[in-house]
Amino acid sequence: MRLWSQFQSWMRALAYRARMESDMDAELRFHMEAYAEDLERQGVDRDDAMRRAHIEFGGVERAKEECREARGVSFLATLLQDLRYGVRGLAKSPGFTTIAVLTLALGIGANTAIFNVVNATLLQPLPIREGSRLVVIWISNLEHGWSRIGPAGQDYLDWKEQSKSFDDLFMFEHGTGTVTAPGEPEQVAGLRVTTNFGEFFGIKPVVGRTFRVEEGAGRHNYAILGYGYWQRKFAGDRSVVGRSMTLNGEQYTIIGVLPPDFADLFSADLVVPFDTDWIKRADSDLGVFGRLKPAGTLKQASGEMSVIAGRIATARPSRKGFGVALVPLQNARLEYLRPALLVLLGAVGFVLLISCANVGNLMLARSLARQREISIRMALGAGRLRLIRQFLTESTILALLGGGVGALLALWSTHLLAIFVPSRIPVPNAADKVTLPGIHMTGKAFAFTIVVSLLTGIIFGLIPGLQSLHCNVNETLKEGGRGFVSRLRGNRTRSTLVVVESALAFVLVIGAGLMIKSFWHLLQANPGFRPDHLLTLRIKLPADAKDSQYREPRNQADTFHRFLTSVEAVPGIQSAAFTEIVPLSQDEMDMGYFLVKENPPLAPGEHLAADYRDITPNYFATMGIPLIKGRIFSQQDNLDRPRVVVIDETLARRFFPNEDPIGKHLQVPDATRPAREIVGIVGGVRDTGFDQQPRPTIYFPSLQSPDQTMSLVVRTSLPPGAILSAIKSAIWSVDKNQPVFDVKSMDEIISGNVSAQRLAFLLLGVFAFLALALAAIGIYGVTSYLMSARTHEIGVRMALGAQPLDVSRLVLGHGAKLVAIGVFVGVVAALALTRLLTNLLFGVSASDPWTFVGVGLLLIVVAVVASYVPARRATRVDPLVALRYE
Amino acid sequence: MEKQLELLQGTLDMLILKAASLGPLHGYGILLRIQQISKDRLEIQQGSLYPALYRLEHQGWITSEWGESENKRKAKYYQLTAAGKRRLHTETENWNRMADVIAGILGTKPEEV
């Protein structure tokens, strides 16, 4: 009610402002005239009486201002007045306004753009029920460096039966399936899930239903369509439920369609169910999520799961030495990108601070130039708070203008960013990838822009506002607006701002410098093979159907061999091979234990472990992996011949330190399988990432160790687009129903591997450049200002015989000195802050001395260059003019 | 003439209320009335009178009305409201009590402590 009456009073004040003003004038005039008349009656003459009445009344304007305030109605009126005054003032100095608005727009725009990325990735909740309580459960064997392996179906069943920390457990497997009807044959991204799928994620299907939990008891060929696939393949037809489709040669009934945002969690075209038998058969590389009980904590659950893991290890010896790794789903998804995003968030914050410092500096210069105006207003009775309010209004207008232009900049740069932010990112150490939601400009981002603009306006408006009020009215007026005392104080603030600015810029440029060096190292790193001119694609033989010829492993190997022969004949292909897993692709993992037959038996519980790779003979030649000793496979190493393997030098060094491994035999723990002779040693490959060391690897000839899914790697001098269709035709000439998928060049695979570093490298580079440019403008501004303030002094110096060189040294020295202090502060800050970069750096230390020295020098050079123009102007000062001027 | 006393902080409002309680007056009239009652012993800044009047009006203790002055000029007359009368009453009481206490303290002789 009180608020309402105040509001009414404001509105009245606005509406009757003119009348209230004239009333007030009339009342005060009446007072003075009445007093003057009384004085006249006492014998004072008329003019003198009026004068005395005025003097004894005191400051009329001040009294009026106090009356307006006393009436409590001046708030809106003053605001409007301030706004009008501010806009007029800004319009009168378009140069200042343009520079200030652009500087702010850069700072605010960059912040909004990065906010869009952070909002889409870190802040957006998962599109599922209570996503924050979901945890990913991996098994781990730290002794062999396996920190996150997908468990087997039996692990899932054991966990589900024994654990009490979870409301429910959910299991899934990424895969790919061949759809042959309706429509053209195509390979689709599939997801096989336990039947609690719908309930677990709280899915509300667009049409139809999800699986019923009890449907997991037996085999049901039901399929749920992903939203994108439904749109693409069925044009969003709602009558699709109940129709059938042919997947991997079997009939499936479509029962529902997933909501569109579910693709942010799983980008699957088709979802099909596990049944209990299938779960028992599924032996590795599955995904398991748990939903923590409302009262449960991650720590508690981890503890319980470790106990269960111990129990499982006793029951199933193959799980000896294995533990579990529990990570909240939201953390696991963004673990790869989070460090880069946080670094960028910090970096744009710095850019904004530098913008603020710059605009604060400009405002300060302006307020000092307006010292006389301010002094006069204060002398006329303007309150200090009233003046600060005026400054704040002005700076807020500027900041909102900057924010507006910044929002436009953000709109444009968000499009650009969306290209550089990877759409799929790896889950570290887990041979898995997740899809990131798309990045758009959102309403939230606009709100963010407005809040940031207002905050900036307050920050850089308050500094000069408070600053200028310290002035001594009398002094300033006496000196005709060139108050030297206050000018000195202003200089100190300005110099501090420049020091802060250069320190911030230094930290940013250091960050960018480190990232540039690191990225260069990454690109130069030798992955153990020649990554150029390689094209890869995957082929999965449809072996799941009951009557498939590919149920016989020998047929799988033969078919891949026929594909290969056909592809090798394509003109422009230098070399081609199949491999189970393409290095750096993070598609899958395959690893296991082995024994050296010739060595004494290992102590119980002790294991040797290595990565397994099934390849065709030409793989090493195609990839450019060097043969170090012995021989590689030949076409004769098939199922009819003695089993052979090739090992990499990492394995040779680690497990055969002082002996020749050639001729020794390796055996997998399963005793029914024959020992395999080591026939060759090849170079190590950084299989899991550029920044990882090569791991012990055993290569098996695929003819002796067939797979259902393999990747073709092709070395070709032709561009990938030009040769892809020829490769596909070659494959279809063998089997016209065989889809190929995951077509990627090795360059793309590598890009995906270093996407976080690339993002940090590119954006830090841009931000560092912005920071450097803004700092240069700041230094230029301060030096120019000091120069003009010291024209008189320089004139005197030159009149006394100073040479132009002395003068320019004086000016350049000042700029360089400020920046040198800034660099010193920056070094301290950078040493503390670059540690946050450690995760993103490769082959360079976070306190790399060369980068620090180089960037320090760069900044001083920038300072000297930025002071050069004012310095030249200084040397042109004509002593006579300068002296006359003052 | 004896030296004028400076007004104690916050007492001007009270004096205005008292002056206006004796009948409607314009601003200048209030000033004269206070000076007359105080026999010119108080120094009042003329300029500070009006903000005080506006403040009291805003608080609802006095109301104003345009009328005609003794010399046939337009002038704004102030009058006490009912709330203003109550206010003056409590202010007066408070002031008297305060004055008693202060006077008591200041009048204390050493042997009384």
Image (spheres, rainbow, N blue to C red):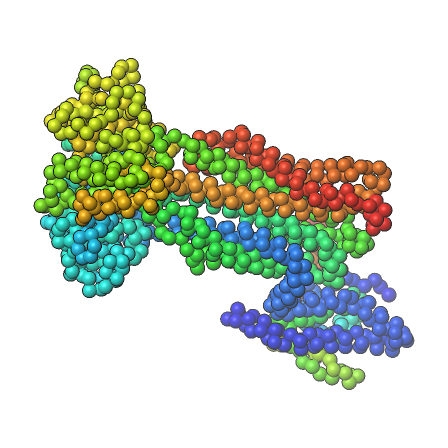
Q: Is residue A813 left or right of residue A174?
A: right
Q: Residue at x 28, y 29 (%)?
A: A620
Relative vertical location of residue B21 with respect to residue A770 in this rendering, above or below: below
Q: Residue at x 24, y 36 (%)?
A: A578
- Observer able to see residue A35: yes
Q: Residue at x 31, y 54 (%)?
A: A127
Q: Quadrant of residue A864?
A: top right
Q: Residue at x 11, y 49 (%)?
A: A219
Exactly how many numbered labels are in the figure? 0
Q: Is residue A309 left or right of residue B66?
A: left
Q: Is residue A703 left or right of residue B62?
A: left
- Observer able to see residue A818: no
Q: Quadrant of residue A719?
A: top left
Q: Is residue A457 left or right of residue A18?
A: left
Q: Nearer the viewer, residue A769 or A834?
A: A769
Relative vertical location of residue A237 with respect to residue A188 in this rendering, above or below: below
Q: Nearer the viewer, residue A881 or A7?
A: A881
Residue A78: x and y in percent read 63, 66
